[in-house]
Image (cartoon, coloured by chain):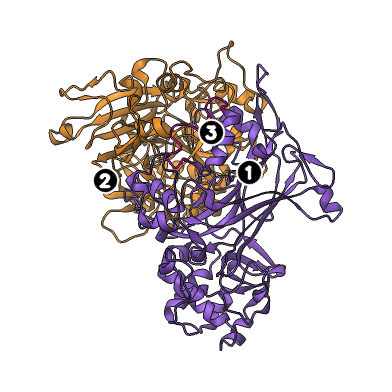
Chain colours: A orange, B purple
Amino acid sequence: MTSTQTTTQTSHSTMHLLNETHEPSLKSWVVSANSVTTDFPIQNLPFAIFKQKEVNQAFRGGVAIGDQVIDLEALYEKNIFTDRVQEALKACAKDQLNDFMAMGKVAWSSLRLALSKALREGASEQKVISECLVPQTDIDYALPCRIGDYTDFYTSIHHATSVGKKFRPDNPLLPNYKWVPIGYHGRSSSIEVSGQTFKRPKGQTKAPTATEPSFGPCKRLDYELEVGIFIGKGNTLGEPISIENAEDHVFGLCIFNDWSARDIQGWEYQPLGPFLSKNFASTVSPWIVTMEALAPYRQPWTRDEQDPQPMPYLESTQNRNIGAFNIQLQALLETAQMRSQVEPAVQLSQSNFNDSYWTVAQMVAHHTVNGCNLQSGDMFGSGTQSGPTPDQAGSMLELSNAGSEPISLPNGETRTFLEDGDNVIMKGWCQKEGAARIGFGEVSAIILPAE
Amino acid sequence: MTSTQTTTQTSHSTMHLLNETHEPSLKSWVVSANSVTTDFPIQNLPFAIFKQKEVNQAFRGGVAIGDQVIDLEALYEKNIFTDRVQEALKACAKDQLNDFMAMGKVAWSSLRLALSKALREGASEQKVISECLVPQTDIDYALPCRIGDYTDFYTSIHHATSVGKKFRPDNPLLPNYKWVPIGYHGRSSSIEVSGQTFKRPKGQTKAPTATEPSFGPCKRLDYELEVGIFIGKGNTLGEPISIENAEDHVFGLCIFNDWSARDIQGWEYQPLGPFLSKNFASTVSPWIVTMEALAPYRQPWTRDEQDPQPMPYLESTQNRNIGAFNIQLQALLETAQMRSQVEPAVQLSQSNFNDSYWTVAQMVAHHTVNGCNLQSGDMFGSGTQSGPTPDQAGSMLELSNAGSEPISLPNGETRTFLEDGDNVIMKGWCQKEGAARIGFGEVSAIILPAE
């Protein structure tokens, strides 16, 4: 296969997005990348920021391949690529990916193609790239970029409806939901990378029957299974991004746990929205899977005909044809007891990003329609991704019916909300016939007791 | 007066905060600083980031004195101060004040004292500092720091009650208001410095009687008269800042206009709070008045006895004794017609920050009680500062009774909400017997038509 050959198309709608880097038959000389179970085959090539454990070195960009990471700072120093690729690598050699993200699609694509070619079986670059590989078991991750602003959306109508029932039984889905891609600003400073631990937050809560609030550790600590969306190229204040151009501004996606203190949230959130119930911790997976890598898993976005159809600024043919993403999402729980007895983590739920009521392109177009500026490295949360059935719920609030129906775990433990020592692990992957399986790795974090 | 002499104390409660830099009788060899009307006498010494107009130079820190600015980069190069002061000046020589803000109270105070002494009549440093002065008419400002996260509070009970009436006539002040210092996360990227222009935002709105929302330029554009609060030293994630230590983490205050699109807000804000109704633009005054400069204007903070008293994490003796700030706030309007006819701007309202229901220390303690980390340069908005009487309302929403009572301007124009070409100007100052008058300068921005 040569660099100009095009791949077998799997559907008409994704045709213009697929190229030789997606070819399912590609194999890498990094043998672990050819395993059917790896998240990181040669068709994926996601980005992270890492350093080698116990080595005195700066954090730098890396690309995952099988069970290895390509050290992009080391690869830049090898100076084996064209100027355009070297320029992209130089931006990746820093301790934050913002500059690379700001370079835009052509730079991202050039580097992806160069790495894809150089990692293929028989590539002449094998020896020099081998010298830049580090086993993933030997590295520490940092946040992939400086997240200037973080916005959390609310794109799952299934989540919005079932949570709405608990906060507003008589009025679960508000009248604006099917018109407005609801979002709100979150806290950037407390976003950390997978592997973090954090203390159970304290705060004010008020039981429905109490006359006054009380103060203490959160009793209804929850996770939220989300997709994280990283902005690549930003826009100027006052210049909206049209839905047609929206995806050109998106660098890639990750898996995201937007921890939530439900009892604090219930008391504080009126009238200006969640605040301390959310900003004590949020955790991202280290790897960002690029929009280009996700091209084979795009699918039509539809809306029920009886629902209001999107306003013109949220409507485009491309969004209809390939606006959705077929990404499997999974939340697992490893309790302290499971960890001490070396039992595997237990699946809590599975859902799919394609059940989202609003698309990534619609989020970008909506966020900027008033002139708001996005900057490279900004992150959106998709909002909790719950599917239409109860076992596809992306939070404990939904799974335990607001704490009224304890979840039984295989080892005899039960949970309504999360307990100290619990490790919540989230995974994401894309799989379909005619395309390579690619994954997002995982995001996990352990809850420590309140102080 | 020598550097060790203490000043006349104006009240017992502020005693420990006052020092020789507050002495009202101090005069400067910068003659304009001795005017009774200047915002920037020698007792103030606020910080900004600026550059000289039409000079090819980097932005750098500056301190205002009368109608001049001390170029702190130039002053650092003069190398006339002690090591401690030079270290502070070095941090101020950058194009953002974050590093200086992170240095903490001792560094801030050392620099303030050194500048106070060097600017006094008869100071031996007069000649060398003269060489570092730039007229304020010759400079451009930038944001004083990188604002990592911006949080907007809602601390005026008068504003909360009157706005609540318009959004929820039957339920204006929610039950949590007197317990929780309500706040929410805002957008950092669209905060700009005084002098900005911005386009009227477009968005979805829905008239109460309409069956469907519509899209177009905002029809109810409003200002919000706020105090901006800049964080100096941050805290580590998971380690709350106690109310006793809260003010050690605050660098200073500015005047802040949190522009709001009321019609967009009314349709979008449920259930997760304001979003596109706020994030199209927010404007800060260039000058940050330090907490130390504000010491003479501190006063007791009280709460009605029939109101719930604060929870322990929001309660301290110091907060009771000197938690409040006597800062006069003023909003003025200059319409395009006034500008073209060279008529002066008209006062819309005046209020005082001491009417705030919650203090700065309570905002800091509340924001971090769940472990949330603050970072140097983060900003809080105080929320719209409205006083108890109708003419003290800090927004058009209140002044025009949600648009139902047009405001008559002296030139014959009327306003319910803001129109294209309107320039909203806000000022702040502190004045009381036995202390020098100090001011915040002003924040202004002109509204451009929607595109």
Q: Reading the chain from its start, which is encountered first: label 3 or label 2?
A: 3
Instruction: Quote the CA–CA distance across marks 3 and 1.
Output: 68 Å
Q: Residue extending furthest left? A: A341
Judged from the image, the secondary structure of the residue bearing numbered disc 1 is loop
Which residues are the magenta region?
B168-184
In the displayed structure, A101 sits above or below B27; it is above
| Three-letter residue code for mark 3 | Gln
Please state the chain letter of the residue tagged with numbered disc 2 in the rendered image: A
The residue beneath circle 3 is A5
In the displayed structure, A373 sits above or below B339; it is above
Q: Are marks 3 and 1 in contact (CB under 8 Å)?
A: no
Comparing A245 with A411, the one in front is: A411
The residue beneath circle 1 is B393
Percent from the top left, x then y, of residue B450? 74, 38
Magenta span includes B377: no
Task: Mark 1 vs mark 2: give the one in front.
Answer: 1
Instruction: Quote the CA–CA distance across marks 1 and 2.
Output: 60 Å
Q: Which mark is residue A137?
A: 2
Residue visible at 44% across and 25% down in the picture: A353
- Check if mark 3 and mark 2 are on a common chain: yes
Please state the chain letter of the residue tagged with numbered disc 1 in the rendered image: B
Judged from the image, the secondary structure of the residue bearing numbered disc 3 is loop
Please state the chain letter of the residue tagged with numbered disc 3 in the rendered image: A
Magenta span includes B175: yes
